[in-house]
Image (cartoon, grey):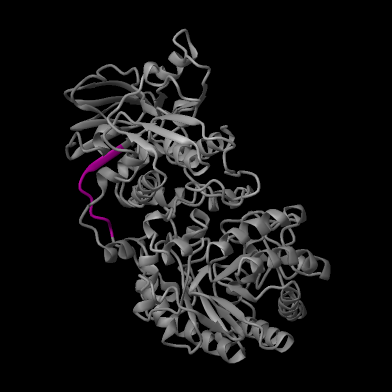
Amino acid sequence: MSDYPHLLSPLELGPLTLRNRVVMGSMHTGLEDAPWHIDRLAAYFAERARGGVGLIVTGGYAPNKRGWLKPFASEMTTRLQAARHQRVTEAVHAEGGAIAMQILHAGRYAYHPFSVSASRKQAPINPFKPSALSAKAVDRTATDFARSVALARKAGYDAVEIMGSEGYLINQFLAARTNDRTDAWGGSTEKRMRFPVEVVRRTRELVGDFPVMYRISLLDLVEDGQTWEETAELASRLEEAGVTAFNTGIGWHEARVPTIITQVPRAAWRSVTARLKAEVSVPVCASNRINTPEVAEEILAAGDADLVSMARPLLADPDFVNKAAAGRADEINTCIACNQACLDHTFSNKTSSCLVNPRACHETLLVLSPARRRESVAVVGAGPAGLATAVSAAERGLAVTLFEKAPQIGGQFRLAMQVPGKEEFAETLRYYARRLEVLEVDVRLSTEAGPDDLGGFDHVVVATGVEPRVPQIEGIDHPKAVSYADVLAGRVTVGRRVAVIGAGGIGVDVSHFLAHDPGETFDDWMAQWGVGDPSLHRGGLTERKPRSVVREVTLVQRKETPIGIGLGKTSGWAHRAVLKQSGVRQVSGATYDRIDDAGLHLTVGGEPQLLEVDHVVVCAGQESVRDLYDALEGPAHLVGGATVHLVGGADVAAELDAKRAIKQGTEVAAALG
């Protein structure tokens, strides 16, 4: 008997039978945009199909050039493009999988000067102002969608997904926020719905019973968004027009509510998905922050959805489904919803990957091929870099011994997972602990390895990590001054009034940790972000409830720049918002004068200030710990000619840099032997 009977059961989407209910949701990776990346794209999808996914959905392909996401971005408009995509569909089918192409018109989110939308209204996240489509152009665009679907079918795709959510063009027609037309395509709720209905109707006329999934926005989470009554009416009309299934979207890209980052509770939006399911008779797919088979199974078993979309979890582990089916769910490399290598890369015009799986989207470039012979590898340090090195080397068949001076693995991740909203980081350590066990790595905890302990190994990888930097401030040794590491590890309990020195990623996290009320509930989280009932509040937005805070926190930095400006592109805004909601006072351009019994003395703008605090938490950066590496490279070098490598924080000390550390560790392991 399977632990996930609902998740692993087949489902029919028109003439297409899916082998299970797992949908790999659409993600734009950057591989879609260049014809010369088609083989990399095929390999990326094939690995997920081999891993057991029921249905894969591609990144978005524009139905015409004005719908490009950026200049010369992905599109499906010609027979040549369709022929090229047969390499993708054939690769997926060879692995027993099914794949759908997403058709997406960017509308006013297009990052180019010839963008178009329902009206001439500029998006707050885009410097380009769109032109308003003429009535004839709207009509042509609806037909362009249908033609793209026909080309996708010709390319061998098993289905399509029409993107009608996240604030892209179709969503822009639906909301009064972005549609002030007074012609046949706007001016009333019914007329605003005409465009998506025409897209589906013309598609169905052109492709017959070919499966057409429509991604519908359940909560716009923007002012002047749709009401629930409008969403339900739209779903009814789309079903009548021929939609085979509904996938669900939550929030526009410009929404002031986070919807997928790690601080969003798991399955936060399942109730609104269940609400849609009650309105339609075709299958409905749940999405957003569903990252384990247990959560997915629970949603399906409760009848809240018929399918479950997991996009980033399939970046993190392409074998997610096979592991769940084989009773190996404890070996799944769980998505931690950090966005650092996926969405942050996408919105920075880089190829996407995954912090916990750097091979994602790089399957043909970062290959863990079997080792030519079973050489021995010593890895010193079990933080993210050391863990990635040890596991990747062992997967290649090398004999790995892992030394860690602490009584447990984890390094900086063990601190990060104490921060509210970053509890998911514990899943990465669970994954690595289990993989070390399965791969029979010789793990030696509470063991500080020196040069004399490393003789006889063919390779030594030094991953000894970092230690907090101690700034040169008068009174830094005062009892009020404490390290962030001691605070997060629970070795120090700070008072009610706290100053935090250093406003990088660690300082922001520590400030959140100190101000956070541990008694907050899921309902509190929703209320704090102002998420309301869309049948009562248009767009699903309402007034935000103030956060209850347990400490008075002042976050101080030397730089004159705004605090938190260097945080992640797609998540930093939410972290900065939490600081504001938590009443964290922010001070930039400060000089640290001294710490004494009175508190922290500063000079700001030429004026002295005293922060009368109980403690000063020091988050002033990190220093590489590389004594061992220096010893191995110096006169006390290893006997026997072992190669020595330096990875992670021991190589470059940079806070919140697990992405680089894990990638570097994996790359070093791939090159050994």
Q: Residue at x 52, y 49 (%)?
A: 354
In this view, the residue in front, 420 or 441, is 441
Q: Give the position of the C terminus as an image quadrant.
A: top right
Q: Position of residue 288 (x, y in %)?
A: 45, 65
Q: Which residues are magenta?
A: 546-554
Queried whether the magenta region covers residue 73, the answer comes back as no
Q: Main secondary structure of the magenta part?
A: loop
In this view, the residue in front, 163 or 20, is 20
| Any part of residue 170 in sight | yes
The quarter of the displayed image where residue 125 is located = bottom right
Q: Residue at x 48, y 74 (%)?
A: 21
In this view, the residue in front, 516 or 660, is 660
Q: Position of residue 34 (x, y in %)?
A: 74, 54
Residue 277 lies, with reference to residue 619, above or below; the image says below
Q: Position of residue 393 (x, y in %)?
A: 50, 38
Residue 532 lies, with reference to residue 649, above or below; the image says below
Q: Residue furthest top?
A: 635
Residue 113 lies, with reference to residue 81, above or below; the image says above
Q: Residue at x 57, y 43 (%)?
A: 368
Q: Give the position of the N terminus as an image quadrant.
A: bottom left
Q: Position of residue 160 (x, y in %)?
A: 64, 75
- Say left or right for 533 vs 634: left
In this view, the residue in front, 359 or 495, is 359
Q: Residue furthest bottom?
A: 240
The quarter of the displayed image where residue 448 is located = top left
Q: Residue furthest front?
A: 373
Queried whether the magenta region covers residue 553, the answer comes back as yes
